[in-house]
Image: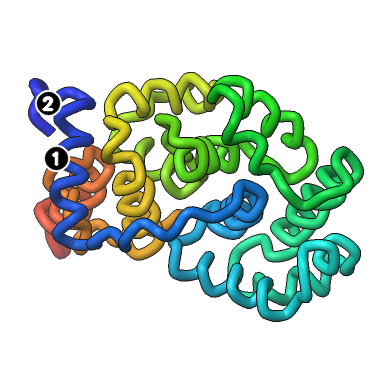
């Protein structure tokens, strides 16, 4: 990566390249806020297509949100089959619905849209020990409340670390990291960024052994450049003379 290419330039170039490889899906119709919270739990860490399928199964297999609330974790986990951490996702959904029902005796959260963004985010954050993560708060802020927020799940953070957009030690302060990314990514590109990153992470920039030769970012990604140089270095190493 050229020394003159700063993080802003790198992220702009990243989006341009990823759009050619992974066209972002169209923005979905707006959901009620409570449904968006549940969908965000489905979506965290997986591409939208997989989250859409799990969410659709949940809506078809359970009569309403109250039935989800009173079901066992295993019953809810069945709709997340094939997704990572299916049991944990199910637990988060049930705990969120239970907590919200105990607070309001309802399955609505649309009153958040009438509050200011900071107040709405603060109210959502009250559920953080009941299934709602920083990703979910940012997702709902972006998708339902019209705010400028960039949801960061672990696969997205992995890509950003490998691109050196996130530096060593920064990951300990997720809120600060998100603020930095929101500074680089304009509101109009927030949806696109979120979708492109998860598709890259799922298909190419996987956790254990990234498929760097097939990555559209390989010319600019420090991790990709390093990984792709290893086989060449081994091939160029002088062979020991035979005795």
SS for dot 2: loop
Decide which of 118, 139 is in the foreground and name it. Answer: 118
Q: Earlier in the sequence, mark 2 or mark 1?
A: 2
Please name the residue shown 59% across and 57% down the image. Answer: 39
Asked which quadrant contains residue 85, the reply is: bottom right
Which label sits on residue 13? Answer: 1
| 10 Å crowding of disc 1: few (<14), some (14-19), many (20+) | some
The residue at the point 40 percent across, 30 percent down is 148
Q: Is residue 124 in sight in this rendering?
A: yes
Crowd class of label 2 (few under 14; some 14 to 19; many from 20; radius 10 Å):
few
Residue shown at 28% from the left, 26% from the top: 184
The front one of 56 and 231 is 56
Q: Is residue 123 left or right of residue 104?
A: left
Mark sitting on residue 5: 2
Q: Is residue 233 left or right of residue 207?
A: left
Query: In x, y percent, where is residue 169?
Result: 48, 21
Q: Is residue 192 left or right of residue 236?
A: right
Image quadrant where residue 47 sits: bottom left
Percent x, y of residue 92: 75, 52
Residue 53 position within the rendered picture, expressed as x and y whole percent measured from the top left: 54, 74
- Quadrant of the image containing the N terminus: top left
Mark in front: 2 vs 1: 1
Q: Secondary structure under badge 1?
A: helix
Q: Are marks 2 and 1 in contact (CB under 8 Å)?
A: yes
**Quarter of the image containing the C terminus?**
bottom left
40 relative position to 24: left or right: right
As drawn, 64 above or below 208: below
* Residue 136 horizontal/vertical position (percent): 59, 42
């Amino acid at each position: 990566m050229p020394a003159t290419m700063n993080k802003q330039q790198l992220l702009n170039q990243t989006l341009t390249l990823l759009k050619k490889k992974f066209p972002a899906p169209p923005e979905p119709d707006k959901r009620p806020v409570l449904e968006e919270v549940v969908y965000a739990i489905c979506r965290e860490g997986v591409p939208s297509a997989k989250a859409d399928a799990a969410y659709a199964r949940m809506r078809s297999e359970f009569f309403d949100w109250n039935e989800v609330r009173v079901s066992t974790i295993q019953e809810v986990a069945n709709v997340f089959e094939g997704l990572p951490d299916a049991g944990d996702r199910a637990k988060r959904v049930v705990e969120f619905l239970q907590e919200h029902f105990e607070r309001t005796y309802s399955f609505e959260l649309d009153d958040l849209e009438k509050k200011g963004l900071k107040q709405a985010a603060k109210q959502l954050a009250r559920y953080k020990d009941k299934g709602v993560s920083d990703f979910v708060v940012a997702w709902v802020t972006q998708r339902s409340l019209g705010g400028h927020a960039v949801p960061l799940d672990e696969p997205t953070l992995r890509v950003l670390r490998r691109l050196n957009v996130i530096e060593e030690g920064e990951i300990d302060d997720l809120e600060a990291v998100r603020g930095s990314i929101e500074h680089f990514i304009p509101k109009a590109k927030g949806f696109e960024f979120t979708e492109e990153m998860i598709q890259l992470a799922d298909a190419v920039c996987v956790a254990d052994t990234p498929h760097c030769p097939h990555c559209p970012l390989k010319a600019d990604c420090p991790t990709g450049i390093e990984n792709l140089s290893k086989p060449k270095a081994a091939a160029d190493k002088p062979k020991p003379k035979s005795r």
